[in-house]
Amino acid sequence: MMATPNPAPTLGDPLTWQPPGGALWSGRWVDGTASFPVHDPEDGSLLGYVTDATEAEVDEAVRAVAAAAHGTHWPAWERREALTAAAALVLERRELLTGIISRESSKTVREAGSEISRAAETLRLSAAQAGQLTGETLPFADTPRGEGRLGWYTREPVGVVAAITPFNDPLNLVAHKLGPALVSGNGVVLKPAERTPLTALAFAQILLDASVPADRFAVVPGSGSRTGRAVAGHPLVDLVSFTGGARTGDAVARAAGAKKTLMELGGNNAVLVLADADWRMAARAVVEGAFGVAGQNCLSVQRVFVAAPLAGRFIERVAAGARSLRVGSKSDPRTDVGPLIDEGEAIRVGEWVEEALQGGAVACAGCRREGAYYWPSVLTDVPEHARLMTEEIFGPVVTIHSFATVDEAVTRTNATPYGLQAGVFTRDLDQAVTIAERLRVGAVMVNDSSDFRIDAMPFGGPKRSGVGREGIRSAVEAMTEPKVVAIRQQSVPTD
Ligand code: NAD
């Protein structure tokens, strides 16, 4: 392993920017023993090389972070100041980050730009949690055995957090793990997605420049099956915070063993459009919610249940909206829908659509592929057993179904293994609340699509959508544990 001292802060040109090392651990940039190339998925151009961390290197990284987390003092006010500075630096380096995200991931330049604003917000919210790391006094006098005692609990960091992240929001989802973990006083080892390690390394530089102590965190790029597994399974890791697919979540849970885990997994989200709804507004929201980031979004709208009297007009409007979207290069600011992360993913999406069409579905828009691009697609009459109905498509495809009764729409919405978010369009608030109570999901958006989120919300869902909740405050709660201190007052006689 070759270590390089932390260099002076540089902003850099997004077209030529390279991290000072292929990984970061033990408080410095390093190049591990092996490396792997990072390509632009759109044109295959080589963007750089990063470390492919081995088990031994992961061990070194985790041990160094654990030593700092357990052995050094980093007061909460300094954590707040560092994360506040990091939020400002994210915005200052917007151009650089937009360039890196829109080249190594499948996001368009416009989509990368909005992710940067979100990531700064995530860090701002994380910084604010420094003032919320409180506890409470305990009711010792409530029991005879508590006589003559007083005490309280405070929240303590769990220790070392392992953060494992996906490719589709390469900056904000990293910020969602590192922000809460660091502000709580933990150390963090980040294993970013194989496709998007450069964004993670650019973010690491921002944390260093914002005065986050260099030994409090590490970034270990590499494959999921080797590096990710070693990080999740390391005995000095106290909590694994994972975002990714449900099947990968199973593998991470096996590697982690009996550790605390937070899992943000997939979705197959539904929107319900009731007979009294503003159906034009609903159609607009569905087009935005289904096709943004080419559908590679855990909150994407995948199924829409629309009241039968509206169905014809609604389907026509959504199909027209899908056809009006401009499919094209990520670097063109006019592009609405960019490519999928690779051609293999676009082929898979095409196969699932074909399966539905073979089963009797009707194509109303799209259903067409060229290389890694898949056109925004609208289908009706999709059979219930098709994978478009039961699995997460993670591509630009929406299925629309008419319903006769609200009860039917609720039952069909709940009939998948997932439960992330849902949307309900209606003018009847009472009806909306009743439906929200019946849907087995983590959040219900009334008069909005399933795709809406602010970063302060408790975030996640039941069933195969995850374990626990992220969203800054919820993540801080999960990444800390109560510690009780009880004092026996020697002047008070006890039995
Ligand atoms: P993925 O599951 O393929 O990979 C996610 C991460 O896990 C990557 O860093 C990968 O290297 C790592 N990994 C893979 N195998 C591993 C193993 N055995 N042990 C440890 N780590 C391992 O996901 P992806 O394709 O990058 O992202 C898409 C998925 O992420 C979708 O299912 C999407 O719904 C989900 N996602 C969920 C949320 C949410 O908040 N609920 C947000 C974004 C994405």
Image (cartoon, rainbow, N blue to C red):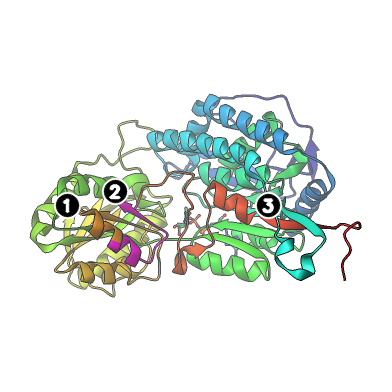
How far is the residue under mark 3 from the one under mark 1? 46 Å
Residue 141 position in % (x across, y down) = 73, 62
Q: Which residues are magenta?
A: 434-450
Q: Mark 2: give few (<14), some (14-19) or many (20+) Cα within 10 Å.
A: many
> Residue at the spot x=23%, y=72% of the render?
383
Q: Which is in the foreground here, disc 2 or disc 3?
A: 3
State whether residue 275 is above or below residue 177: below
State whether residue 283 is above or below residue 331: below
Q: Amino acid at mark 1?
A: Ala
User: Which residue is at the front of the view, 29 or 369?
Assistant: 29
Q: Which residue is mark 1?
A: 277
Residue 114 position in % (x across, y down) = 42, 35
How far is the residue under mark 2 from the one under mark 3? 38 Å
* Residue lying farthest to the bottom in this orientation: 385
Q: Is residue 38 left or right of residue 399?
A: right
Residue 205 in view: no
> Residue at the spot x=37%, y=45% of the render?
293
